[in-house]
Image (cartoon, rainbow, N blue to C red):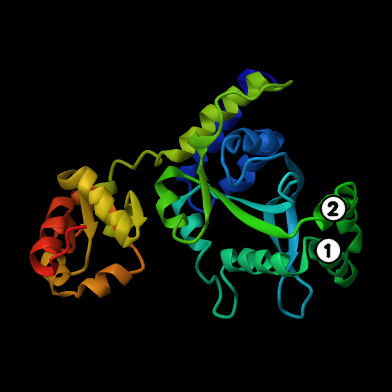
Amino acid sequence: MSNSFLVALLENICESRKIPKVQVERAISPFLDIFIEDALRLVFKNDKNYSGKIFKICPEFPLMKIDETKQSTNIDWLMVNSDRNEILFVELKTSDSSVSGSFKRSKPKEMPQFDKYQEKSNRIHLEGGGLLIDELFEIAKASKQPKKYAFIIEMISKYEAMIRSCNSAKIIYIVPKTSKSIALSYVEKVLTFSDFPAEIAGDYSKEWRIVQKYLRKFDELPEPDVDLISRKESTHRPMGYVKFDQLIQICKTDGDKIIISFTGGEKAFANKSLKELKNRRHYKWDDVDNIKFWIRKNWIRGDRVLEILKKDHHYLG
C-alpha cells in the first residue's frame, strides 16, 4: 500500500464520520490493530499501574454472555500484560454516541456493553484467566458453525499458559477526547487518540506517523453542517460530562469561559441541597460560545456556579 493511497483511505474514513450509521470503528480498527501492542507498551511505559510487556492475543475476542444461551459478545482486543499477570480488555470507540451507548442498555433485558466486560473482569479476579479459554470452547461447541472459532482457538493456543496464569483483569477504553470525561465515570483507564505515541519504531514507522495523524482527528468533533444552528438543540454535542468534584475544578479553571447544564438554570441549582448536587450522576458542560446551540435558561456560567455554591450552600470547594 503506497503512502498516498493510505492517506486517501484514512481521509475517506475520517470524512465518513459525518454520515449517519457508518460504522467507523470497524473501518479504523484494522489500522490500529497492527500497532496496538507497541502503542500500549509505549503509552503505559511510565504508568505505575499499567506498565509492562503487553501482548495482543486476539482482536474481536468472544466473551460468553452470562445467560444460558452460550452466545457471546466481542471485546475489540483481548490482550495480556505478562509482567503483571493481567488480562486487558481493550475497547475502541470513535464517536461520542458510541461511548455513551456502551454504558446503556440496548434492549430492556440486555446488560450494557461495559457491564458485560466488568462482569467478566470480576470473574477473572475470582477464577483466573483460564475461564476465557474454557468458555471459548463452550461457545464453539454450542455454535452451529464451530469451524469459525477454530482460527481463534489456534491464535490463543500459543498464549494459553500466559492467559491461565492471569489472576486479574483491567478494562481500557480508547475514546475521542470529547468523550473522555463521561467514560471516566465508568472506566478506570481511558485513553484518547492523542495519547498514542508520535513515533513507533519498526518496519512500519512511516505508516504509523500517517495513521496517528488521522487517529488524532477522532479527538476533534466533525465539521458541522452549515445549517446546524437552525436544527434542534439535541443535534449539538456538549464538550463533556463531569462528576461534582470535576465540575468544581473546571469551574475554577475556566469560570466564565464555560457553561454548565442544569434544568431550570440558576434558581433550580440554588434550590437543590448540596447533597443532591454532589450525588448527581454527572453534569454536562460546554464552551460558553456554544450557548447558541442550547436553551439558555437551562445553562449556568461556570463562575456563577461557584458563586451560587458559596452564597446558597456555603460551599468553598
Tell whether label 2 touches label 1 (CB within 8 Å): yes
Q: Amino acid at mark 1?
A: Leu
Residue at the image point whose x is 34% and y is 42% from the top: 224
Q: Is residue 10 left or right of residue 15?
A: right
Residue 124: quadrant of the picture:
bottom right
Residue on which the image places disc 2: 152
Q: Which disc, if any, is residue 57? A: none
Name the residue nearer the viewer: 158 or 233: 158
Residue 223: quadrant of the picture:
top left
Please, what secondary structure does the residue beneath circle 2 have?
helix
Image position of 4 with respect to 38: above or below: above
Residue at the image point whose x is 64% and y is 19% from the top: 206
Q: Can see residue 210?
A: yes
Residue at the image point whose x is 64% and y is 42% from the top: 29
Residue 97, position as x, y percentages in the image:
46, 56
Residue on which the image places disc 1: 136
Q: Can see residue 231?
A: no
Screen quadrant of the N terminus = top right
**Few, some or many residues within 10 Å of mark 2 (<14, 14–19, 20+):** some
